[in-house]
Amino acid sequence: MIEVANKVILKVITVNTTDVTLQSEPVFKDRVIQPGSSSLNCLAEHGLAISIEIIYEDEMHYQYLFDTGGLKATIINNLKILKIDPHSFKRIIISHGHYDHWGGIIPLSKFLASKTEFIMSPDIYCPRFSLSKELRDIDVDRTQLDIEQLKKDQKIRELPRFPEKKFRMWIAQNAFEIRFIKEAVMIAPGVFLSGPINIYNVDEVTKGMLIFKGGEMMRDTFRDELALYINVRNKGLIVLTGCGHTGILNIIQHGQEITGVQKIYAIIGGLHQNWTTPDHMKNTLHNLKKLNPELICGIHCTGFKFMAESMQQIPLKTTFAVVGTTFNL
């Protein structure tokens, strides 16, 4: 018997945009509700945090947090304004090691219940780097990079590093739990974490990012990236992504394989299309149309161009989200 959730409620707590004038669209009925004046004092930042409530037929439910936003820690302000109690989060899932997804983790820790479980990849502690725009297409696997010279030329930038020492201290002091994910796993009935996402098409993977791992600098293929899949009764899979660095099509195919569920119900999260080419964007949209989900909502790093194209090509399935947007799925 395939285990499923009966209902899922997602609320965007932190994202790049706030908007109290954005209207709920009738085509989505009560499935996508924009916040209006309830988000008046909320803040936006380059980051992502989404609360997840999963409800089952027997009224059992779980409440998780997917990412903690960026370094400004706007999550603390927004949780208060949106009337969400941090004590309600049973688990905190960190999608990957970039600062705009774990940035609020230390400030947030002060407001969490003891025994809260943090779930992430063990690679989250690895140093990460971003190459300048003109070097993004370089084949790092075949080219020996002079990192020190690139630093001098300001063509490589080290990204803020996960605060391992402080985090471990908070874990010990507050009786939190930490769980490192090394493979796909079901964390609740019908709820799956991806583990390292299979790369079926390498062209889908974000270029121009490096990681220092095992004493070696290498191209980052985002082995730490975690996507969340929720199987909803009679509807199919919700696919929730942080940045989608491994490529949304790879992420979807991986989810179909590990869950055994082919029907895609909703795709929500970062799709990282800001750096993509027109041909890549066209191919992604073509394949998303073939999958025919009920809802597509690219946020955070997805990019205006991609969302505009999606709205034009898939108008009855594409929607926008800002701080405070609620999805009843």
Image (cartoon, grey):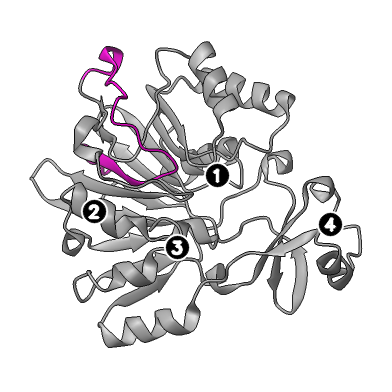
Q: Secondary structure at mark 3?
A: helix
Instruction: Give the residue pinned by disc 4.
Output: 140
- Eyeballing the image, is 88 above or below 58? below
Q: Position of residue 206 (x, y in %)?
A: 68, 46
- Eyeballing the image, is 72 above or below 319? below
Which residue is at a point 55% across and 74% down the rendered structure image?
Answer: 125
Of marks 1 and 4, which one's residue comes earlier in the chain? 4
Image-based side of 104 in relation to 327, left or right: right
Residue 1 visible at all? no
Q: Is residue 143 magenta?
A: no
Which residue is at a point 41% across and 83% down the rendered structure image?
Answer: 168
Q: Which amino acid is tagged 2?
A: Leu
Disc 2 versus disc 1: nearer the observer: 2
Disc 4 versus disc 2: nearer the observer: 2
Instruction: Give the residue pinned by disc 3.
Output: 102
Instruction: Give the residue pinned by disc 2.
Output: 79
Of marks 2 and 3, which one's residue comes earlier in the chain? 2
Q: Which amino acid is tagged 1?
A: Gly
Instruction: Kindly report the distance in space between the C-alpha atoms of the residues bearing marks 3 and 4.
Output: 26 Å
Which residue is at a point 22% across and 69% down the rendered structure image?
Answer: 111
Label 2 crowd bin: few (<14), some (14–19), many (20+), radius 10 Å = some
Question: Which is more toward the observer, 217 or 47?
Answer: 47
Q: Position of residue 172 (x, y in %)?
A: 32, 87
- Are dots 4 and 2 in contact, CB under 8 Å? no
Residue at the extreme front: 41
Residue 132 visible at all? yes
Q: Position of residue 39 (x, y in %)?
A: 24, 39
